[in-house]
Amino acid sequence: MPSRIVLRAGGVALILDISGDRLPAVLHWGADPGELTAADAVALAAGGVSPVMPSSPDVPPYLSVLPEPWTGWLGTPGLVGSRAGRAWSPRFELTGIGVDGEPAGGASDDGALVEARSVVVRATDAAAGLELELTLEIDGSGIVRARARVTNTAADEYGLDALNLAFPVPQAAAEILDFAGRWGKEKVPQRRAITVGTHRREGRQGRTGWGSAEILHAGVPGFGFAAGEVWGLHTAWSGNHVHYLERVNEGSTVLGGGELLLPGEVRLAQGESYTSPWVYLAYGNGLDEVARRFHRLMRARPQHPSSPRPVTLNVWEAVYFDHDFDTLSELAEIAAGLGVERFVLDDGWFGSRRDDTSGLGDWTVSTDVWPNGLGPLIDRVTGLGMRFGLWVEPEMVNPDSDLARAHPEWIMATGGRLPIEARHQQVLNLSIPEAYDHIRDALVALLEEYDISYLKWDHNRDLVDAGTQPDGRPAVHAQTLAFYRLVAELKQRYPGLEIESCSSGGGRADLAALAHTDRIWVSDNIDPLDRQQMMRWTTQLLPPELLGSHVAARVNHTTGRQHALSFRAATAVFGHFGIEWDLRQATEAERAELREWIAFYKQHRALLHGGDVVRLDHPDPAISAHGVVAPDRSAAVFAYVSLAMSGLVSPGRVRLPGLDPRRRYRVRPMFAETLSRITQAPPWWNAGEGIALSGALLGSAGLHAPHLPPEQAVVYLVTAED
């Protein structure tokens, strides 16, 4: 067997030490050092051994990707569990290695070095009755992912409490960046210095959560979008989960993550296994490089949406629960005339669902509202050339529903009591086979009867006291797997079906959810000022084409703020563009302007959804600037945004980075005539013709920005002239 393995791709290298019979340790994770010899690897391993310090173990601690206490590691262990207090500190011994799908075989050779794209390490502790399998892979983007599987080989039951993987980062990493948030204000960045101890972010909501850490970054002091080494970890799991950064007093620092298991949630009988979620590791010089690695990873997936992302009208903020054929037909006609390509009917079409207090779980079309079914509306929508989508919330149930009255035992509960309600609803336990089958069959019946190409899949409450009746054992783990299984089953049965992951907005946005769905709803709040921040930071993990981004009404329904259409559209156009607005209330001038924005989006969506995201490190917090640059550097779209009143009269020059320094580009402001009413334009705008400069000058010197009032934006189209 090889003793050292290099996983290398995309300018990144992960070098593993698998010498002796121990689990693999990371010798290096970061920038690709170039060609390595076996002697280099031996020296790298020797050079990374710490001296033995006073009052420390006589052998330097050994830190594997599954940290083990027996080695002298005094930080968080990777595997936590026992057999009623026994076998709680396993000592795994290596039994085999597979490289790129093939067994490496033989005894460990201390001089052997292998390069690979994937490695599977198997180990056992016969005394503890456990087998372990570790899988590590590197994608062409330079993203590493890893997971572990533990199997009980003994006769008595093994209670598993945690299975987390951890990866060292250098002490040069001195700052943490991750995210917090709340409903309507997702992805709020937070940053602080790394100190001795543990920065632990737990998600106990039974879903990813609005305030999920998303990616836990560790970086050199002052790292930003453009520069500064950054190491990041994302736990790809849509249930309870953990991200942590830990620095022990001997100096080692690790990023770790995995599923957060509730007490007694995983108990393994003989022969049973538990597999941890994938944790994703991203290294880059600057946050933009980290983000672009994730975007390339996502875009390389075979199931990644390949068709142009259709302009979508969702009618929620237009009509709410007040469904009426004539009203919705009129909205569809207006939308089609503007160029909308998908029409989504939101909550209120089923059962007794006239408000949010009843009917949830009864997935049959309401004869009170739709006496002839949904067919007439769908025929009208598709006859206008649009696709039809429908809102569902399959994992939830109102106590005031036919389903809850018929099967109260299907509600997740523990301790002989119902959980507290949220939004007048409880959680339907899809880990119960009969409940799963009932919901699946109800959704299949809808998809069979109607021409539905899109489901907006909501999940509007946290999982509190989420157990399985009658014994009340915790079931968040099983519920999460049931969600994945249900979506996968529907997608397999209906290959053209697209599904949006909506969870009170951005409450279920992670790579595991996106492995089964086609986009996320970033937030229930579509106020463009708040969305500037949320879109900016959600793209740290997900590419723009997966981010539902809609034009709101003039007066925002969440915040009450009023914004010009130019600001609302300039914000929405950098995602999967759509509208959530009662278009009957729009003026003719607003409809004409919206039609132009839709045409702009359609003309440039291949660039917007296939280019490299660029975000600027601007010193003025009142200013934000970002863009998307084509992979071949032939074109770009940038936005310059005024978030608030600046302390300076003039914003000065703003750089447009990411272009080819050797090419010449023309920069034109879009919709300049509309903006002329609200801005003082610089002379270079030249009646909308713009200016031509080299990519080098645009990236290093930039162009003078217009003077925009607060909460306004201008979009630039940049095209190469050669």
Image (tube, rainbow, N blue to C red):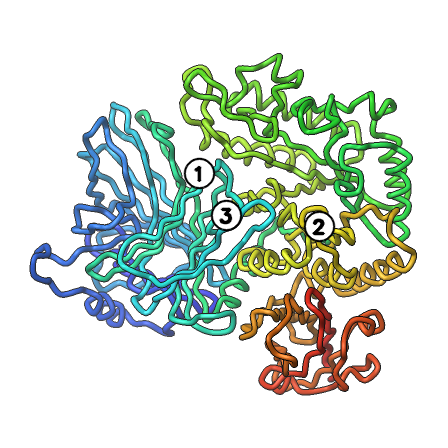
Snapshot quadrant of residue 690: bottom right
- Image mark for residue 111: none
State if disc 3 and disc 2 touch (CB < 8 Å).
no
Snapshot quadrant of residue 590: bottom right
Q: Nearer the viewer, residue 206 or 484?
A: 206
* Residue 249 in sight in this render: yes
Snapshot quadrant of residue 460: top right
Q: Amino acid at mark 3?
A: Gly
Q: Residues within 10 Å of mark 2 (few under 14, many from 20)?
A: few
Residue carrying label 2: 560
Mark 2 vs mark 3: give the one in front.
2
Mark before the other along the chain sequence, 2 or 1? 1
Query: Residues under labels 2 and 3: Cα distance?
Result: 23 Å
Task: Tell me what residue is drawn at x 64 percent, y 52 percent.
Answer: 546
The x and y percentages for residue 536 are 59, 61
Image quarter (top left, top right, bottom left or bottom right) of the C terminus: bottom right
Mark before the other along the chain sequence, 2 or 3? 3
Q: Amino acid at mark 2?
A: Gly
* Residue 272 in sight in this render: no
- Image mark for residue 204: 1
State if disc 1 and disc 2 touch (CB < 8 Å).
no
Task: Tell me what residue is drawn at x 49 percent, y 64 percent.
Answer: 290
- Image mark for residue 211: 3
